Amino acid sequence: MNWQNTSGRYNAVSIGLHWLMLVLIIAVYACIELRELYPKGSDPREALKMWHFMLGLSVLLLVLLRLFVRFTSGATPAITPPLVKWQAMLAKVAHIALYGLIVGMPLAGWLILSLSGKPIPFFGLELPALASENKDLAKVIKDIHETAGTVGYVLIGVHAVAALFHHYILRDTTLSRMLPGKRRH
């Protein structure tokens, strides 16, 4: 499996992690939204919340791996034709915001459970608390977490629309660098 980026494409590991994380993030959002279909305290609602926590922590593990790969796989593949300066700067800001979201959200969730005095489930394991119980602080962080979740919808949507815009309207290699398979622009 190719670990190094080429001049025109991301490596196979980065591409696989990108798309796997998209699927996981969709599942994280789906679990927390679908829980609303069930009454508070019901088994299905609690199961969806537990899956939300576990999948969110899975995103955290994968983003740490993804960051490692990003910093060890060579230069970022060039976009052809190159972006104008303002687009390149906007893309950098958007990527930093997305990484902040996918690192910060799972950490905030872990912290909320810790501060609430609840167990932190992770596929049959119970992870350690990050802090001592403090229900008032848990509520503050939960409010921030929920607001950031809403911002996440927007960031992810803008990211997807921008990739499609670059691919179909500008016809550059922005998206094709991250598509699976051996694609040529």
Image (spheres, helix red, strand yellow):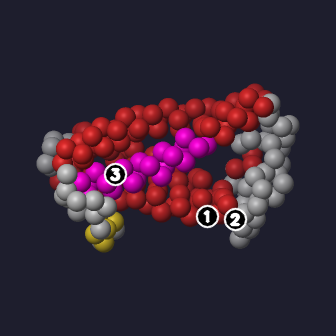
| Label 3, label 1: how far apart the Cα atoms are | 22 Å
Circle 3: residue type: Gly
Left or right: where 131 falls relative to 97: left
Residue at 75% x, 46% y is: 176
Q: Which mark is residue 109?
A: 3
Q: Pinpoint residue 118: horizontal percent, then vertical percent.
A: 20, 58
Q: Where are the magenta residues, as a range?
A: 95-116
Report crowding for label 3: few under 14, some 14 to 19, many 20 or more residues within 10 A (C-alpha): many
Compared to residue 86, the image places residue 71 above or below, namely below
Foreground residue among 125 and 168 = 125
Name the residue carrying label 2: 72
Q: Name the secondary structure under disc 1.
A: helix
Q: Which mark is residue 68?
A: 1
Quarter of the N terminus within the rendering:
bottom right
Circle 2: residue type: Thr
Q: Name the secondary structure under disc 2.
A: helix
| Label 3, label 2: how far apart the Cα atoms are | 28 Å
Foreground residue among 124 and 179 = 124
| Label 1, label 2: how far apart the Cα atoms are | 6 Å
Q: Are marks 1 and 2 in contact (CB under 8 Å)?
A: yes
Residue at 24% x, 54% y is: 115
